[in-house]
Image: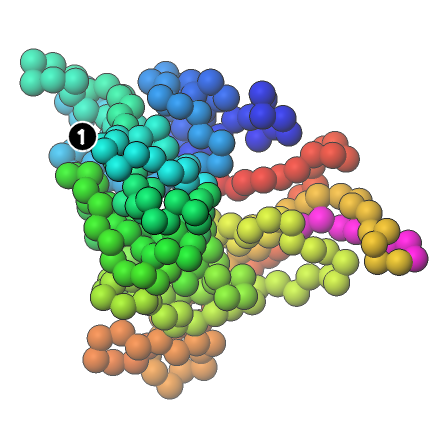
Amino acid sequence: MCGSTSDLMHFFPMADRRVVCVDQSGRGILLEADTGNVVMMPPLHKFKLMPISLSVPSPDFGDHDLDGGIRSSGLFVMERILRPEPSGMEQTHQFEAFVHRRPGSTFFSKSWQCQLLPSLPCAHTTKQWHSFPQIISSYDVLNGGSEICVSVQGLGTYCLNTTSHTWTEVGKWTLPFNGKAEYVPELKLWFGISARDQTLAAADLSAMDSQPQLLGRWKELDLPEEWKECKGSQLINLGSGKFCVARFLRTTTTKGDISDELIDHNLAVLTGVEVALHAQGSNANANASKGSGRVELKFSNHKSRCYKPNSSNGTISSVF
């Protein structure tokens, strides 16, 4: 990601080791890491300044496409900072999806299409317009991709049915994470960066009738006092309970009064963490209740690596 808006590009990770790259005009390409293939994507209807993205399996896809491709998935892209919209607006430029499907019943092969989707219900509530801009604080995929869940700071949590594209308000509470939560099927839990203290944390989001509670938290790194976080941390799901925690930091020096603090370097620290599930009574780090029994989570650290941009004014803003 470059420094100026005119050079800005966004990178949206998808399933099967693929990533969609979109430039400031909304034009995009799909890169397939395993094959090296590059696929032209339809442009977004409108460029997103600070987007979030969620990759979900498309419900009507089998293991292989008719044209011989691998099992595909859809990509939902939404502005993180929401703007108010008229109540009668059914679709919005703030929320779009890349979908791989047949353009019509007479077509045999599938192609990528970009479609507008309904905005969050809170964007149409005039009594809440005074609270705009509204910020999406956390989001995740539920029920194998049949729903995506979005929390709006100070307002509540909403779920979108990814087939019917209808929104449902879940509650006036928000998810206990900052940013994206990642589901680990082996542990039957969601993991993310805690909204409370920015630690790696777990929660059970299978039941959403009340605000989910954190089941365990883990501080994977002790940072030097002069290293300060300059943006929200990021959790990368490596599969089977393995994660990479990315902390975005800056080093500072002070001369005399604290108001003279100067930024020296931006950097990112990546730490490998592994989480395992154990029966009650083992020497674990966190206890969690699931179903009728109790389980324990054990967090283990792997190596940490520090990365600095090539230029003095460069910034590492995302990891995938």
Q: What residue sits 60% from the left and 52% below the top?
A: 247
Instruction: Please state the horizontal and vertical placement of residue 67, each as a whole percent of the image.
Output: 18, 19
Q: Amino acid at mark 1?
A: His
Tell me: residue 139, above or below residue 124: below
Q: Residue furthest right?
A: 256
Q: Residue furthest left?
A: 105
Q: Please identify the quarter of the rendering in which residue 79 is found.
A: top left
Q: Please identify the quarter of the rendering in which residue 212 is found.
A: bottom left
- In the image, 76 versus 171, the foreground residue is 171
Tell me: residue 156, above or below residue 266: below
By secondary structure, the bulk of the magenta-drawn segment is best described as strand
In the image, residue 206 lies in the stretch drawn in magenta: no
Query: Local crowd at mark 1 within 10 Å, few (<14), some, or many (≥20)?
Result: few
Q: Residue furthest top?
A: 106
Instruction: Please state the horizontal and vertical placement of residue 145, each as a whole percent of the image.
Output: 24, 46
User: Can the viewer see residue 71?
Assistant: no
Q: What residue sits 19% from the left and 24% below the top?
A: 101
User: Can the viewer see residue 218?
Assistant: yes
- In the image, 159 versus 12, the foreground residue is 159
On the image, numbered disc 1 is attached to which residue?
A: 64
Q: Secondary structure at mark 1?
A: loop
Q: Which range is magenta?
A: 249-256
Query: Where's the N terminus, which quadrant?
Result: top right
Horizontal side, residue 104 vs residue 283: left or right: left
Q: What residue sits 62% from the left and 55% below the top?
A: 304
- In the image, 160 versus 107, the foreground residue is 160
Number of numbered labels in the structure image:
1
Q: What residue sits 34% from the left and 35% below the top?
A: 85
Horizontal side, residue 52 vs residue 157: left or right: right
Instruction: Please state the horizontal and vertical placement of residue 80, each as a whole percent of the image.
Output: 44, 41
